Image (cartoon, rainbow, N blue to C red):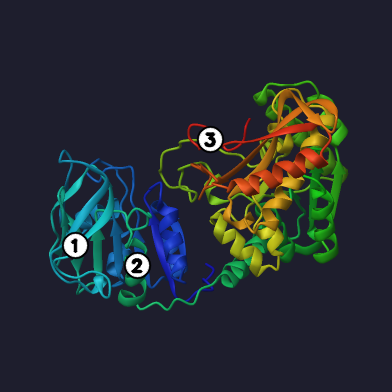
Amino acid sequence: MTQTAHPDSVLIVDFGSQVTQLIARRVREAGVYCEIVPFQSAEEGFHRLQPKAVILSGSPASTVDEGSPRAPQIIFDSGLPVFGICYGQQTMCMQLGGKVESGHHREFGRAFLDVDRDCQLFEGLWSSGSRHQVWMSHGDRVTALPDGFEVVATSSNAPYAFIADEKRKYYGVQFHPEVVHTPDGAKLIGNFIHNIAGIKGDWSMSAYRQKAVEQIRAQVGDKRVICALSGGVDSSVAALLIHEAVGDQLTCILVDHGLMRKDEAAGVVAMFREHYNLHLLHVDAADRFIGELEGVSDPETKRKIIGRLFIETFEEEARKLGGADFLGQGTLYPDVIESVSFTGGPSVTIKSHHNVGGLPERMKMQLVEPLRELFKDEVRALGRELGLPDSFIGRHPFPGPGLAIRCPGGITREKLEILREADAIYLDEIRKAGLYDAIWQAFAVLLPVQTVGVMGDGRTYEFVCALRAVTSVDGMTADFYHYDMEFLGRAATRIINEVRGINRVVYDVTSKPPGTIEWE
């Protein structure tokens, strides 16, 4: 059994909560290494990791149901500090001799916690008699405490909202400290890690990098890896990490479908070939893609054509290389099957996601996904650690179908060129104004509408260009960016003057929902 490289670590036992990964995020933000293991293999994980503290996650299950998940007894026999969250609190109570019941008032959403007495976990944060906002999501609740525990805080529907056995360093909360809607939640987790468990916060992204490299080497051995490189931050960081691990065993393939932004493919190729000495194949498949897309106006049909052709092109290139055993992907945690515990816990499947639609199944390849435990901002931090330039690290998201879904209606080569030029000018103006990093995503859209204009003494009849810019945290919701009119006027004037084919510019002020960020 391999020993962990991290002497000071936290084990998170996953009972299938949809937000277990957020617990890991908070622990990592506190500078401490942690691993999530499903409850079924928690005992093995405990022996392997030899943690200094344990956190028990929430769950969609009910502790009162027969066969519902439990924490391995070794955790309670070890004498280590334990922090139980929601279901974690309930199973801890049941396993230590307390009682949990269903059928009481449920609590979902914002609640207020009244602190009844001081507790070591509250040090520097909360004090007796204070009131704090938390986020609840539970149906069952603790109704009798195990020996040694006392109530330290309550909410209106959770008389055992925060319990503690200070002697054994056991803490249980009915709310979710890991979510942003519990404002002090991250600090509570930090207090548990640093003050209660005595773990120093010295883990860093360089440590994650080292561990990821070791894991890739162990997984791949001497076999060949191919990686689809798009030039976005996720695939770029994944490629660099895999390359650091296995060197020449990696071949990256950039499928240029003719739907990328201006000079993008050339920029990506130059950076990776010149600065990172990476084996990169640049496949110019523009004719193939645009040939099939020309005249197609239905957005879903466009996406399906692009997805199918990407797979076909990628497969052909892989065959030319003599095949490979592994496929490298820049899959992140939010991309992984939505709300399924990525470690294989019992959470409910909400939506499936495949990064490169259907490739692994068709090509009988194993996946190498070194970023699947990370969020976007963590990937960017890892990119900096790997020496990626800021121009790549901070890039706005760019969808796989590219300009095809920013050109509503039938696609032609001419329309794509017009859009590419307009988009480049718009992004240039955003950068000049110092707004690029303040905006989550920005792009131009070429509308299937022509309007009458006047240029000089002549009449024009050309396309309308719509500009889009949004602010967002995760892309799930978004608000339109509130430009000043001077900026919009400047960008519009440049586009109309410099791009032949556009004589009118409009700005999209739709939020998500009800709109989407992209137009198609």
Left/right of residue 497 with respect to residue 144 in the rendered view: right
Which amino acid type is shown beneath numbered disc 1?
Answer: Ile
The quadrant where residue 186 appears: bottom left
- Quadrant placement of the C terminus: top right
Disc 3/disc 2 C-alpha distance (Å): 36 Å
Q: Which residue is mark 3?
A: 510
* Three-letter amino acid code of the residue under disc 3: Thr
Residue that numbered label 2 is attached to: 187
Other residues around mark 1 within 10 Å, as few (<14) / some (14–19) / many (≥20):
many
In primary-sequence order, the first of circles 2 and 1 is 1
Q: As rendered, which of 485 and 356 lies closer to the eye?
A: 485
Say which residue appears at 79% left-offset and 58% top-offset: 249
Residue 205 vs 338, above or below: the answer is: below
Front tag of 2 and 1: 2
Q: Are marks 1 and 3 in contact (CB under 8 Å)?
A: no
Rendered residue at 54%/57% (across/down): 374
Query: What x and y, as percent, mark residue 1?
Result: 52, 67
Q: CA distance from mark 2 to mark 1?
A: 17 Å
Q: Is residue 53 left or right of residue 31?
A: left
Foreground residue among 208 and 387: 387
Q: How many marks?
A: 3
Sequence order check, earlier mark of 1 and 3: 1
Secondary structure found at label 3: loop
Q: Position of residue 25 (x, y in %)?
A: 46, 60
Instruction: Where is residue 444? Give x, y as percent.
Output: 69, 39
Contact (Cβ within 8 Å) of mark 2 with mark 1:
no
Q: Residue at x 87, y 32 (%)?
A: 287
Report the residue at 64% width, 50% height from top.
396
Residue picked out by circle 1: 163
Q: What is the three-letter code of the residue carrying label 2?
A: Lys
Residue 26 visible within the image: yes
